[in-house]
Image (spheres, rainbow, N blue to C red):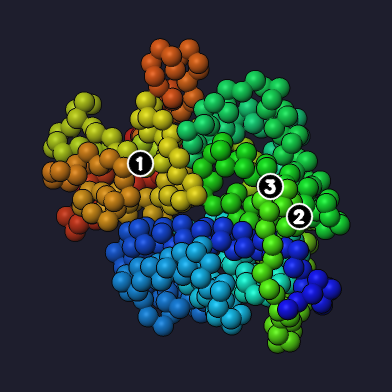
Amino acid sequence: MLSRTAMPWFSAPDYWLAREILERLLGAIYLFAFATVIHQFRPLLGENGLLPVPEFLRSTRFRDAPTLFRLHYSDRLAVAFGWLGGILAAAVVLGLPQLAPTPVTMLTWVVLWVLYLSVVNVGQRWYSFGWESLLLEAGFLAIFLGDDRTPPPFLILILFRWLAFRVEFGAGLIKLRGDPCWRDLTCLDYHHETQPMPNPLSWYFHHLPRPLHRVEVLGNFFAQLVAPFGLFLPQPIAGLSALVMIGTQGYLVVSGNYAWLNWITIVAALAGIPDDFYRVFVGFSLPLLTDPAPWFVGVVLLLTALVVVLSWWPVANMISPGQVMNQSFNQLHLVNTYGAFGSVTRVRYEVIVEGTAEELPRPGDWREYEFIGKPGDPARRPPQIAPYHLRLDWLMWFAALSPAYAREWFMPLLQKLLEGDPAIRALIRRDPFATGEPPRYIRALYYRYRYTTWQERRATGHWWYREPVGDYLPTVTLAPRGEAREAELDPDLPASTRRGAD
């Protein structure tokens, strides 16, 4: 049995419950991540997907994108990866691997990490979000948390805190250096309305009094630029700092859909909360704990040294006036730099896709495709999606910001819709042609969106007001060879200068 003074420099029995909560919550996030693999990987990245993995593998080297798919790729194998990862993640949520000896617990996290790394490194544009690296880094650290019968290694808890520090402090710095609306405290006058994917409460947050928006920004700066330093101070300061960060991340959870970005940050911050904080609300006692094996101590020390070395790159990035957001400095996505919303969009634009089956369509013949999460029908309340990640919907937001984000995949998307591809249809909330023939023509229009006012909401029941801006893409149809002809994606070009379709 482990006494409370055994290996005090290494073991942290006072964080046993903290580790339990951290691991199970991280397992739940992995469960959502692998669910997206099961349901979205094939239409987006499969052999007949929008950005096929086999083509990507042929054009890249192993050292540029290490992945198990180098050995063999098939859509069935990709889905099998999703199911295996989901089963293992569910087992972690239930606490099953943690009951096994340390090597089994470690192996479970290793498999989770390798599977998801294999997916991310072939994910191309669909997996280019900062929270992919964040999940991989957290999952890699979790390998070294130990099993339920050993005390948590204090060094690993510190590394989780260092992860939380980089997420928050990097985000705070990029805001100070970025959009001036952060410095004049006005960014949240816009952000709740223009964020990538609003949730059911975002409309209400947008309509908070403007002085409260100033308080939101100030609170954000405190949580991102001040509280992270407290993570490395003695208790109870470290725990209180972690609670501040968790509270602000919870605020973001209820005000928008950010996939699992906020939840992973909460997981990392949990490493700063000792079990005594939980005892204020729930009484519990520690199980019998044993000293960690010498080999495990050695592995943890080696990992700590590795993280110290790899931390040079994110630290250099954070102190640089040319700081970048969400950068991985190695293909294993270890010890990354983070940050979000260095600039805030003032006006919301949406790309609306419409189709028609008519050979000579008139204005009333066009029917709109409705996506699952992104704004479309002004009367539809924004849904709650997070922590699930709708990859197509997120990229549609980026496509509206700049056509450059859509050049690789937007025309293939329209071609799949023209073909009535069932896999792509499964990513759409409402396909107006689902019960009949696919459309003859498809077009993409550019709309400006804004939230309705309180008065407009009462009068119309609508959450959004929208007005057309112009064409995002001219009308396209299937060419004789079965492909949609490429067209200009720049909405600023006059319609007469854009290429049409066959």
At a point 43% along the width and 34% down the height, the residue shown is 382
Q: Which residue position is annotated with label 3?
A: 281
Q: Nearer the viewer, mark 3 or mark 1?
A: 3
At a point 76% along the width and 40% down the height, the residue shown is 221
Spatial CA distance of label 2 from label 1 is: 46 Å
Q: Which mark is residue 307?
A: none
Q: Nearer the viewer, residue 184 or 418?
A: 184
Tag 1, which secondary structure? strand
Q: Which residue position is annotated with label 2?
A: 276
**Callout 1: few (<14), some (14-19), or many (20+) C-alpha neighbours within 10 Å?**
many
Tag 2, which secondary structure? helix
- Say which label, 2 or 1, has the lower sequence index: 2
Tag 3, which secondary structure? loop
- Residue 316's spot in the image, x, y percent? 78, 62
Spatial CA distance of label 3 from label 2 is: 9 Å
- In which quadrant of the rendered image does the N terminus lie? bottom right
**Callout 3: few (<14), some (14-19), or many (20+) C-alpha neighbours within 10 Å?**
few
Q: Is residue 420 left or right of residue 383?
A: left
Q: Nearer the viewer, residue 444 or 201?
A: 201
At a point 45% along the width and 78% down the height, the residue shown is 68
